[in-house]
Image (cartoon, rainbow, N blue to C red):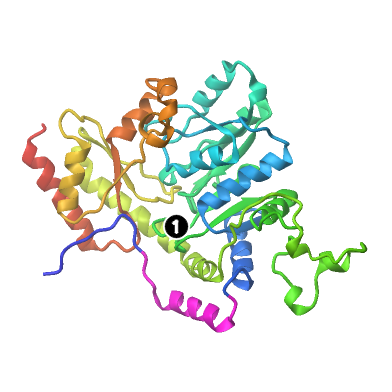
Amino acid sequence: MKKIRIRVGDFRLEEEEKEALKEVIDSGRLSEGVKVNKFEKSWAKFIGVKYCVATSSGSGALITGLTALKYLKNLKNGTKVITSPLTYIATSSAISTVGFEPVYVDIDSDSFNISPENIKAHLDQANDIEEYAIILPVHLMGYPLRMDEINEIAKQYKLITFEDAAQAHGTTYNGRKVGSMSLLSAFSFYIAHNIQAGEMGAITTNDQGIAKLIRKIKAQGRECDCLVCTRSNGWCPPLDGYNGEDDFDPRFSHDLIGYNFKTMEFQAALGLSQLEKVEWIIRKRQRNVKHLNKVLERYSNILQLPEYSEEVSYLAYPIIIKQPDLILRKELRMRLEEEGIETRPLFGCIPTQQPAYSYLKEQYEGKLPNAEFLGLNGFYIGCHQYLTEDDLEHIEKTFNKIILKRSFD
């Protein structure tokens, strides 16, 4: 008998994906080209913004976006960035990599997101508001932040908002898609995310100047910023407009210090094929969350189940153990894994539970109670579009087997 394995995320190379990859191979162009350009335009249209710049990963998108703001606003090292303490570490790592200081406020336990109230309370008591420049909130697990309120706070304190929408492809808030409600936003198309391309990221914005700057920074700060390089066709706009005496090639002239965060045609081709069925992906994940909520509702005195909304594009199915004195997360995850249901912890509270940020533990311990509780007692399982009826039934039976046996009532 085949061993059951229900993954947190799954990806299937269907015929359309295979054909998309074959087109790239047949084109003879592997580095950024037509497919990347097409994906950027398609993703910008889907999110509802004017511009999109693809990067090699979601981390690359965050680092490039923050670097662009550093150049654009002449921000110094040590500039403070308000962000979430409960998320994948990439957000904080990007802030630190660019030379900024992550500053954490507590989350709302139901949405897992930092709340406008906590952001404002922190800024109201800040010793020097001039030290702050950016609010970088995260739409965790697909749940939208209250961006209208956050943007109002940012406007009040003259701060920039930069959305991390890596986990919320297609989520809407007040009729708009997340990733369209701030100066710029970052996405990730990691293999376990809603829209999957293996490894790829993107930045979206309505600001043409920022889009051009990001395009330069992600390509080692070189002077050219064409969507697709035309040099191989014998034509180059920056070169044609150059009147200097030096032998000038904009591909090898760099006026900024940047990175190599360019992506490849393969990832863009996969992203385009996924985008064609994005509505099916979102609706299927929503149906799976709705079904799991229904069959697991009997345990709501022990487990906090995810709030259901047709506006949410769910990354996964998060569960919080409300009464850890009755069952530990470690035990429940271990039992689920034994039954073939893959799990992941809910990331951990970064300044108090992640070893990389242990230097902040004394400063934050006890000040982020919701993030600390969820970081210790939260985990998630899959709700992806490839779950079958048998998979859902197995999840239900497994929870019954584990929990009913313990007589928690």
Query: Does residue 334 belong to the magenta stretch?
Result: no
Residue drawn at (36%, 59%) of the image: 284
Q: Residue at x 40, y 58 (%)?
A: 283
Whether 14 is among the magenta residues is yes
Asked whether residue 298 appears in the rendered view, the answer is no
Secondary element type, mark 1: loop
How far across and down, in percent of the image, does residue 101 sit? 56, 31
Q: Is residue 239 above or below residue 380?
A: below
Can residue 139 be seen in this snapshot? yes
Q: Position of residue 261 (x, y in %)?
A: 58, 57
In the image, is 194 to the left or to the right of 205? left
Q: Main secondary structure of the magenta part?
A: helix
Left or right: residue 206 versus residue 400 is: right
The magenta-colored residue range is 11-29
Q: Is residue 308 above or below residue 105?
A: below
Q: In the displayed image of the protein, which residue is found farthest to the front?
A: 246
Direction from residue 323 to residue 365 in the image, left or right: right
Q: Which residue is mark 1?
A: 190
- Of the 4 image quadrants, the one containing the N terminus is bottom left
Return the residue nearer the eye: 158 or 279: 158
Residue type for callout 1: Tyr
Is 18 displayed left or right of 147 in the figure?
left
Residue lying at 36% horizontally and 56% vertically, measured from the top left: 285
Q: Position of residue 323 (x, y in %)?
A: 21, 29
> Would you place residue 363 above or below residue 234 in this image?
above
* Between 135 and 283, the one nearer to me in the picture: 135
